[in-house]
Image (cartoon, rainbow, N blue to C red):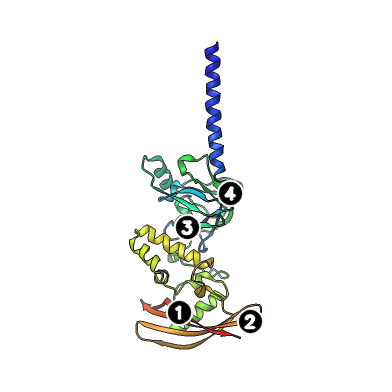
Amino acid sequence: MKRSLFFIIAIFTFFAQFLTAQVYKSKDFQNAKVNIKYYDRTMYFPGMVDDNPIYVSISVVNTGTETLRFKLADDRMFSLDFNAYTIKNTSLPSTQKLITKRSTNRTVYFRELAIEPGETYSFTENVKDYIEFDEPSIYYLELIFYPELYREKNIEITSNRLSLEIRPSPSAASATILPVENKSGALLKPESISPDKVIEQTIIARQKSLWDQYFLYMDLEQMMLRNSEQQRRYRAASADERSRMLENYKSDLMQNRIDYDIVSIPEKFIIENTSYSQTDGSVTVIEWFKYPNFREKKRYVYKVRQRDGIWQIYDYNVTNLGTE
């Protein structure tokens, strides 16, 4: 009898210690917040994983007063899940790709990251790599983040929810999906227009916060590589890592975290001079920026070059011309 009682007490003690350890571990992430938003919103259709991706920007935020440490797998499928629900709260199935990866015995490589109070770590993922969208409908999308990787599923952080509209599949003639104009839904594609028109359309798109149109004539890779440190990292990165770096760069531009001059919104502008050869050119623009008590005047020189008949912005410089 005594042995049985001792055995029962030992079992309860073990489970109490186990649960205490899990609760303690979870407290490490009580000040971690995860936000999601559409990275480059367009029209979404069933299937078409690569041709019509649903890119979502994911941000891990440290809302506490101490350093936040978490793990992030090189293959993000071991760090997060997406859930999509119908209006009737029925969840959509995971992709076979996701199921296969998690059911196969493999080594999961990861990095240990640390972000200070108030800081954010962001990256981008294609939701269609995680969820099967077979039918057009309205869905609600959320993300589950595992700061100790998928193997520790009991420790998770749930994001905000987004509404997601999956439209009926387009005809075969429009199977390759490009960014769309926000109001009309018309597909966007760069046109063979002159360098000054490229700059004019780009600035107007920024004034109207039309990001799809703003990036239409921009060589993002070359713009990012203006930074020597980014260039060094990019040259040493794998193809997947390079893709992620470009996605993060674009996200940072949209959130006004880097290269402030190129994403600043002018109140008005005048194209001062345009010069170009068959392959390279430059467009000089005077731009005015309005502040509460004054206006700032700057001269922008946008450098452009032609690829496959399309002029693209790949560099720029700015000169301050004083205030008015």
Label 4 SS: loop
Left or right: where does residue 9 sit relative to residue 244?
right
Residue that badge 4 annotates: 31
Residue that badge 1 annotates: 317
Q: CA distance from mark 2 to mark 3?
A: 38 Å
Q: Which residue is at the far front?
A: 66
Residue that badge 2 annotates: 294
**Amino acid of disc 1:** Asn
Residue 180 bears which disc, if any?
none
Could one spot residue 171 in this view of the protein? no
Q: Position of residue 81 (x, y in %)?
A: 49, 47
Label 3 SS: strand
Q: Earlier in the sequence, mark 4 or mark 1?
A: 4
**Of the pair 155 and 162, the residue shown nearer to us:** 155
Q: CA distance from mark 2 to mark 4?
A: 40 Å
**Amino acid of disc 3:** Thr
Which quarter of the image is occupied by the C terminus? bottom right
Residue 124 bears which disc, if any?
3
**Amino acid of disc 2:** Phe
Q: Earlier in the sequence, mark 3 or mark 1?
A: 3
Q: Residue at x 54, y 17 (%)?
A: 6
Q: Residue at x 58, y 49 (%)?
A: 31
Q: Earlier in the sequence, mark 2 or mark 4?
A: 4
